[in-house]
Amino acid sequence: MPMLDKLSASFRGKRNLLLARRLGELAAAIAKRNGGRRLKVIDIGGAPGFWTTLEADMPADITMVNIEPDKTAPARSGRIAFESVAGDARDLKRWPDRAFDLVISNSVIEHVGSWGDIVRATSEMRRLAGHGWVQTPAFGFPVEPHFALPLVHWLPVQMRAALLPHLPRQGYEHLDHGTVGDARRAVEEINLLTGREMRFLFPEADLLRERVAGLTKSFIAAWPVGWWR
């Protein structure tokens, strides 16, 4: 859906402008309070490309955590230093409480597993930093963003798995000749969230909404309350 791609790009642009501004402010505040210390950020599920498109330039150390570390990640971009490490969003105990100034995660929590897995991952995010920015697509939006298909995410799991290989979806090409198991895994690895669920997961955050025609397309949990607005 080209229109959906354009909308997503537009939202990313607006989102990145706000985030880049807040990052600069936070980096300046951290440096002032701590004798010039660099901003410490953990990006869960992140990639260097995100920071390139963000166009942020501040003294920061970015730790990118993925199941498989990105071995192609640059060591540096401007004043930002990158470290790519292997890790599971559901268990980040290798780092103590408040090990970072900021946690960032974009379109990740809907992929970590069951509801229990999501609760564990978001609890870890809240534990690791006093500031956070966690974005995820909204269940209530009528177009499923991963497949770019209307309404399919509102169907029962078995029906989605049966229909998906036969629909003109975006990506997931392996389903064209895949098994029933492949289709079930593709469906069950995506768990979109409602606003009520996001408020439960992030009780001490502002819940920002990106809207299209009055409908919420995605949520951003941003904390502390009032800091991101």
Image: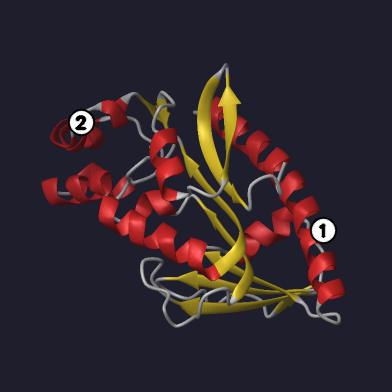
Q: CA distance from mark 2 to mark 1?
A: 47 Å
Callout 1: SS: helix
Q: Nearer the viewer, residue 177 or 219?
A: 219
Residue 101 coordinates in the image, percent (x, y): 66, 69
Q: Amino acid at mark 1?
A: Glu
Q: Amino acid at mark 2?
A: Leu
Q: Are marks 2 and 1 in contact (CB under 8 Å)?
A: no
Looking at the image, is 48 positioned above or below residue 37? above
Work out which quarter of the rendered image holds the C terminus and state it: top right
Looking at the image, is 63 positioned above or below residue 225? below
Going by the image, does 36 lie left or right of 53? Answer: right
Callout 2: SS: helix
Residue drawn at the location 48% of the way across and 44% of the way down? 136
Pointer 2 residue:
163
Residue drawn at the location 49% of the way across and 80% of the way down? 95
Residue drawn at the location 20% of the way across and 45% of the way down? 183
Closer to the observer: label 2 or label 1? Answer: 1
Residue drawn at the location 52% of the way across and 39% of the way down? 219
Going by the image, does 163 lie left or right of 120? Answer: left
Residue 218 coordinates in the image, percent (x, y): 52, 36
Label 1 CA crowd tier, 10 Å (few <14, some 14–19, many 20+):
few
Pointer 1 residue:
25
